[in-house]
Each structure stands twice: as C-alpha cells, then as structure tokens.
Image: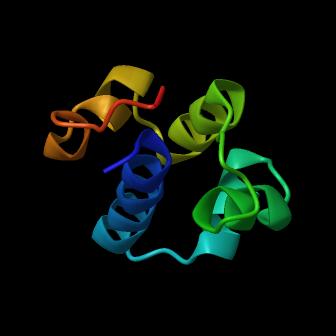
Amino acid sequence: MLIKEAVEKRILALCDERGIAINELANIAGVPPSTVYSMLNTKSQNPGIVSIKKLCDGLEISIREFFDSDLFDHLEQEIK
C-alpha cells in the first residue's frame, strides 16, 4: 500500500469511528470540503502534511495519533 492510500483509509476510518461525514470533518477542521475529497480520490497523489494536521486538529487528535495505525507499518517504497 502507498502512503496516499493509507492516509485515505485512515481519514475514512476516523470519520467512521466518530460517526461524521466528510463534509462535517471539513467544517470542523476549517478546510474546504474539496480539500478533503481531493485527499480521498486520485486528484491528489500527495496529501499535504499541513492539511492532515488541520484534519487532526478538527478531530482533536495529534499528528502522532493519526499515524499510529497499522496502515502505516508496511508501506510500499514510493521511489521506483
């Protein structure tokens, strides 16, 4: 799995755990919904760390908590 896919799955899992929709996450994080949706589809191959941090702030978790998931344990090499 690539990092982009892991980030996408983590965002969706966190929303599911909290019972919130993507639009609600965007609103509480203070980012446009299009930013979150672009992180979740092929439009953005490189979700920015600043955007991820804003989502974490909205979810009231640290960036460390965001990346503390098995999803990030065995990522494929990005450079090929």
Would residue 76 appear left or right of 74 to someone viewing this image? right
Vertical comparison of 15 with 51: above or below: below
Taking the view exactly as shown, the residue that stands out farthest to the front is 80
Vertical comparison of 37 with 78: above or below: below
Vertical comparison of 34 with 53: above or below: below
- At a point 48% along the width and 26% down the height, the residue shown is 79
- At a point 67% along the width and 54% down the height, the residue shown is 28
Would residue 23 appear left or right of 56 to someone viewing this image? right
Residue 5 horizontal/vertical position (percent): 43, 55
Would residue 16 appear left or right of 22 to someone viewing this image? left
Residue 68 horizontal/vertical position (percent): 22, 32
Vertical comparison of 69 with 18: above or below: above
Identify the image quadrant of residue 24.
Answer: bottom right
Residue 20 horizontal/vertical position (percent): 49, 74
Residue 60 horizontal/vertical position (percent): 46, 38
- At a point 41% along the width and 25% down the height, the residue shown is 62
Is residue 24 or residue 38 the one in the foreground? Answer: 38
Is residue 23 or residue 71 the one in the foreground? Answer: 71
Q: How is the image coloured?
A: rainbow
- At a point 32% along the width and 32% down the height, the residue shown is 67
